[in-house]
Image: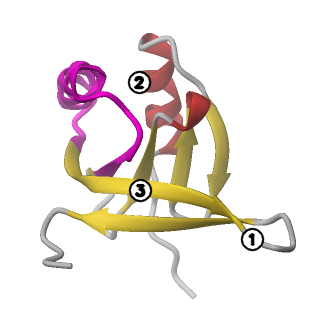
Amino acid sequence: MNLPQRPLGTVVEILQLMGLDVTHQYEDLVFVSHSLFILKFTDDPAHIDLYFNEEIEEEKAQELMGQLDALGTLHSLTIEYKGAYALSENSDESLSVEFFDLTDPG
């Protein structure tokens, strides 16, 4: 099985420059400080999808997008805003993530 290269080190560096931390990393998902947003690795190591917590204020999201875009560019990464996400707790106390893509008509 050939796994794609994922620039986790670069992502950690970008987040540290923003004063943020990786709180959890699972498969292709990187959860960021206080569940502000999730970064999702794609098949292209130079492209990362961005999903904001559905509860984030629009002004804060815009500010973070600007920082991510600028720092991503400096590190040869494209960080593309794709939509929002919601976390919910399951009966077994595990968490579920639901993504709401901008392109999803639902």
Q: In the picture, which quadrant includes the C terminus?
A: bottom left
Q: Amino acid at mark 2?
A: Ile
Residue beneath label 1, please?
90
Residue extending farthest to the bottom is 1
Residue beneath label 3, please?
85
Sequence-earlier tag: 3 or 2: 2
Q: Is residue 49 above or below residue 12?
A: below
CA separation, marks 3 and 1?
Answer: 16 Å
Q: Nearer the viewer, residue 53 or 39?
A: 53
Sequence-earlier tag: 1 or 2: 2
Kind of element beneath mark 3: strand
Q: Amino acid at mark 1?
A: Asn
Residue beneath label 2, please?
14
Q: Are marks 3 and 1 in contact (CB under 8 Å)?
A: no
Neighbor class of circle 3 (other Cα within 10 Å; few <14, some 14-19, many 20+) is: many
CA separation, marks 1 and 2?
Answer: 32 Å
Kind of element beneath mark 2: helix
Q: Position of residue 22 (x, y in %)?
A: 61, 34
Sequence-earlier tag: 3 or 1: 3
Neighbor class of circle 2 (other Cα within 10 Å; few <14, some 14-19, many 20+) is: many
Kind of element beneath mark 1: loop
Q: Residue at x 22, y 21 (%)?
A: 59
Q: Residue at x 22, y 36 (%)?
A: 76
Q: Which residues are magenta?
A: 49-78
5 horizontally vs 62: left or right: right
Q: In the picture, which quadrant includes the N terminus?
A: bottom right
Q: Position of residue 101 (x, y in %)?
A: 24, 66
